[in-house]
Image: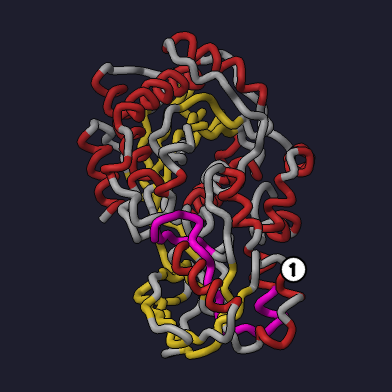
Amino acid sequence: RAEQWGLKKFREAGIDNARLESFTVPNLWLGESAEATITSPASFAVRLAAAPFTSSTKGVLEAAVVDAGDGSPEAFAKLGATARGAILLIHSKEMRTFDDLFAEYMRNNDVIEGVRKTGAAAVLLQSTRPRGLLYRHPLTGNGFIAPFPAAIVAREQAERIGRLAANGPVRMRLRLTNRIGGAYQANNVVADIRGTEKPEEIVLFGAHLDSWDLGTGSEDNGANCAMLIDVARGFRELNVKPRRTIRFVLFTGEEQGMWGSAGYVSKHRSELNNHVAVTIFDTGTGKTTGFYLNGRDDLKRAIDEAMKAAGADATNHSEEALDGTDNFDFMLSGVPNLVGIQDPGPYLPDYHAETDTPEHSNMDEERKTAAIASALALKLADMPGRPPRQTREQVEELLIRTKLDEQMKGFGQWEDWKARRRGMH
């Protein structure tokens, strides 16, 4: 329904060539139900949600709950034989910054390896959000299904369980039912405003249409999809005729491992030399203050000129290179790429959470982002020259220089890059 919605909206905006382009997602995962009860030394229901890409319990699992600290290798090493067959409770600090968010993801490999070594039966991850808020935290970064059940537990209840475990044995009844399957087909929504002088050259603007299911995905990332549709509508209403083609893409499969953008790169591989630049918006409706340059500081001047023309102050750029959104496979393929820097303050509390609903989105600020995106799209489409595509050697140097290789290893992506299964061939 979301794909058809995006297609319909582009066509209503006057983009007659709007279309769906299919790709393959390698693994299906859907959380269906999650129930848990502490049975001793007290009795109370536990509020929790299954962690994506983890297994079901295959019925009811009844076992001891063992406190595994912060889930580090050192914490796992202290557990000894108590962890075998147990449900492990892993504590988390409250998330306040993007550094906290990525630290949560970078811990995944330690948790998976720790469960493998200790023979634990399941994992409870303390929610990083206060006041009982639940969210989806994928436990793998590439769609691989972890071979054990795991769930996010309400923060305050995790603290209570930890206190009980510090004073004696704790037992839990846990039932997680997930729908797990093989590969399936999904679609990106693609729409072009054709260039007048260099129609074969493409300036791509993207956002991702899929979201996790506890909320409705307004901040992550429906609002930015709506914003790009509004940019396309404005261009049509003003009869804008760019020199290069401006392509709008609503990717899906982003939350499963960025498979929509990877599928686009694979489908359009022979055309990537004609992709002048790719710009992604994926962090909600906070104020846009600049762009992640992803190692492409040769785009900085064009951005700043566009912001000056638009009267916008979005010039506080970062040299940082990003993993985790739809610029990633374009970067691995050497295509110049940018990601909007949007204030994380309004975004992080609702990221992947039950509260990711339109009531928590700042659409007045998002209209300003639409103006910024419009100005940048026209600048990139009309500028006389264009930045070069990087070679594989240049991309690898960028990954190592920005320490993105360490993040890719944490997400299980580095071997795919080295084996040339992902990125430039």
Residue 61: x and y in percent read 47, 89
Judged by its main secondary structure, the magenta piece is: loop
Query: Relative to residue 51, is residue 215 drawn left or right?
Result: left
Query: Relative to residue 1, is residue 123 drawn left or right?
Result: right
Identity of the residue drawn at 67% across and 30% down: 319
Whether residue 147 is visible to the viewer of this picture, yes or no, is: no
Q: Which residue is mark 1?
A: 73
Residue 281: x and y in percent read 46, 36
- Where 136 sits versus 266, above or below? below
Identity of the residue drawn at 39% across and 61% down: 132
10 Å crowding of disc 1: few (<14), some (14-19), many (20+): some
The answer to which image quadrant residue 229 occupies is: top left
- Which quadrant of the rendered structure holds the N terminus? bottom left
Residue 62: x and y in percent read 48, 90
- Colouring rule applied to residues: secondary structure
Identity of the residue drawn at 47% across and 53% down: 254
Query: Relative to residue 12, is residue 56 drawn left or right?
Result: right
| Of 374 and 13, the residue lying toward us | 374
Whether residue 203 is visible to the viewer of this picture, yes or no, is: yes
Q: Is residue 87 magenta?
A: no
Residue 190: x and y in percent read 38, 42
Identity of the residue drawn at 56% across and 65% down: 139
| Of 340 and 359, the residue lying toward us | 359
The residue type indicated by label 1 comes to Pro
The answer to which image quadrant residue 354 occupies is: bottom left
Q: Is residue 130 magenta?
A: yes
| Of 329 and 172, the residue lying toward us | 172
- Where 147 sits versus 127, above or below? below
Q: Which residues are magenta?
A: 114-138
Q: Secondary structure at mark 1?
A: helix
